[in-house]
Image: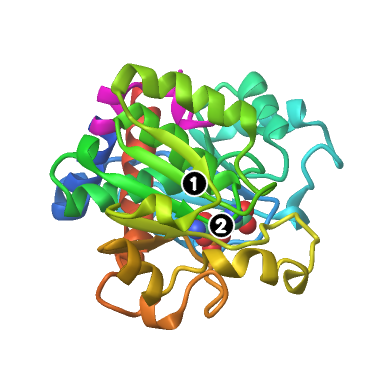
């Protein structure tokens, strides 16, 4: 029984296999129409979502499976009943649990007490399905992920963490460019740095946009993540020098742009860049569905 709480649970070959399967499912959907036939998957959300909710629901349907959506109305995790009981009950009915939660510990509790695979669809620390969709999108545009240089600009959040870890395993250089004090969690960076030693990926954290000259891809995400009550106005001045805009692309020579979305136009990214020729952002959103199907197909059919 395997789970996906973060991408450290998969080695380099396995991550490449997931990306290859996602691309195959995208190219040849007819071959996978019964990939999850007879399988029921609970998708559980403690936080808001557009892409994750819709891509899991429609993606599972495309593989012949059935998705059951649970939101907070259906039972706040750990409040109406314990995470243990939640996991044990769900395991009697379904073949997999996809969960978007506030606290990573909730996912660990689900994994401990479920007898079906558990997939993290975002928590405070990680967003592994997103990072895998991102690397699938990069792989569609670059033949060798170990030669790619990826810059992440902005808040050192869950998305930055999953990009660091996944890049480290795949051998992609990842530099996080953040204002001082807003970089990634030091423990998670060190974990990624350990993984990078095996693949030769260069990982770095800086507050200087000059350090990403000659990079290939510029990624950004919101400056205030879900669950953080800081008003956006309070952080705009701090983060604005790290905006993903045309001047940044011109000064660094970066050719491609990613954003997990939801985007805050004219804050972390300009409309000019988001809608411009460098943007792979809608391919990235589409690829959420294909890579998640590859993840569910692999985990559930191996269980
Ligand atoms: N990127 C992403 O996870 O989007 P949602 O929050 O809309 O699911
Ligand atoms: N870092 C963002 C990602 C949203 C998909 C958040 O956690 O809100």
Membership of 109 in magenta stretch: no
Horizontally, residue 228 falls left or right of residue 23, namely right
Q: Is residue 48 above or below residue 113?
A: below
Q: Give the range drawn in magenta.
A: 1-16
Q: In which quarter of the image is residue 292?
A: top left
Q: Nearer the viewer, residue 302 or 134?
A: 134
Q: Does residue 228 lie above or below 12 as drawn? A: below
Q: Check residue 282 in the rendering and tell me which mark sits there, or answer none.
A: none
Q: Which residue is drawn at 37% across and 43% down?
A: 132
Quadrant of res 34: top left
Which color mode does the image show?
Answer: rainbow
Check disc 2 and report the residue beneath it: 154
Instruction: Say whether residue 121 is visible.
Output: no
Mark 2 surroundings: few (<14), some (14-19) or many (≥20) residues within 10 A: many
- According to the picture, the residue beneath numbered tag 1 turns out to be 176
- Relative depth, front residue between 139 and 88: 139
* Position of residue 195 measured from the top left corner of the image (x, y, whole percent): 42, 21
Q: Earlier in the sequence, mark 2 or mark 1?
A: 2
Q: Position of residue 267 (x, y in %)?
A: 57, 75
103 left or right of 158 in image? right
Q: Are marks 2 and 1 in contact (CB under 8 Å)?
A: no
With respect to residue 50, does 293 lie above or below? above
Give residue 87's position: percent from left, percent from top: 67, 30
- Per the image, label 1 sits on a secondary structure element best described as strand
Q: In this image, 72 relative to 161: left or right?
A: right
Cα–Cα span, label 2 and label 1: 8 Å
Q: Determine whether the residue tagged by mark 2 lies in a helix, strand or loop.
A: loop
Local crowd at mark 1 within 10 Å, few (<14), some, or many (≥20)?
Answer: many
Camera-nearest residue between 183 and 52 = 183
In the rendered image, the quadrant that contains the C terminus is: top left
User: Is 14 colored magenta in this rendering?
Assistant: yes
Horizontal side of residue 38 vs 107, given as left or right? left
């Amino acid at each position: 029984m395997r789970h996906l709480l973060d991408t450290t649970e998969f080695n380099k070959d396995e991550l490449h296999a997931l990306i290859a399967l996602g691309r195959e499912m995208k190219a040849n959907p007819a071959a996978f129409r019964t990939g999850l036939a007879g399988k029921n998957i609970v998708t559980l959300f403690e936080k808001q979502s557009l892409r994750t909710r819709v891509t899991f629901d429609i993606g599972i349907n495309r593989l012949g499976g059935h998705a059951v959506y649970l939101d907070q109305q259906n039972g706040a995790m750990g409040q109406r009943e314990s995470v243990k009981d939640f996991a044990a009950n769900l395991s009697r009915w379904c073949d997999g649990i996809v969960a978007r939660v506030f606290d990573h510990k909730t996912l660990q509790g689900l994994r401990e007490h479920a007898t079906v695979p558990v997939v993290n669809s975002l928590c405070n620390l990680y967003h592994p399905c997103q990072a895998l969709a991102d690397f699938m999108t990069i792989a569609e545009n670059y033949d060798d992920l170990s030669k790619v240089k990826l810059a992440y600009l902005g808040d050192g959040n869950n998305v930055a963490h999953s990009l660091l870890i996944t890049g480290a395993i795949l051998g992609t250089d990842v530099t996080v460019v953040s204002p001082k004090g807003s970089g990634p969690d030091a423990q998670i960076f060190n974990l990624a740095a350990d993984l990078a030693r095996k693949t030769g990926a260069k990982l770095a954290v800086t507050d200087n946009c000059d350090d990403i000259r000659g990079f290939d891809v510029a990624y950004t995400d919101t400056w205030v993540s879900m669950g953080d009550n800081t008003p956006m106005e309070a952080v705009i001045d701090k983060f604005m020098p790290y905006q993903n805009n045309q001047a940044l692309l011109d000064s660094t020579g970066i050719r491609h742009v990613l954003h997990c979305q939801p985007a805050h136009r004219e804050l972390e990214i300009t409309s000019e860049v988001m809608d411009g020729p460098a943007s792979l952002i809608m391919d990235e959103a589409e690829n959420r569905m294909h890579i998640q199907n590859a993840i569910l197909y692999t985990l559930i059919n191996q269980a």
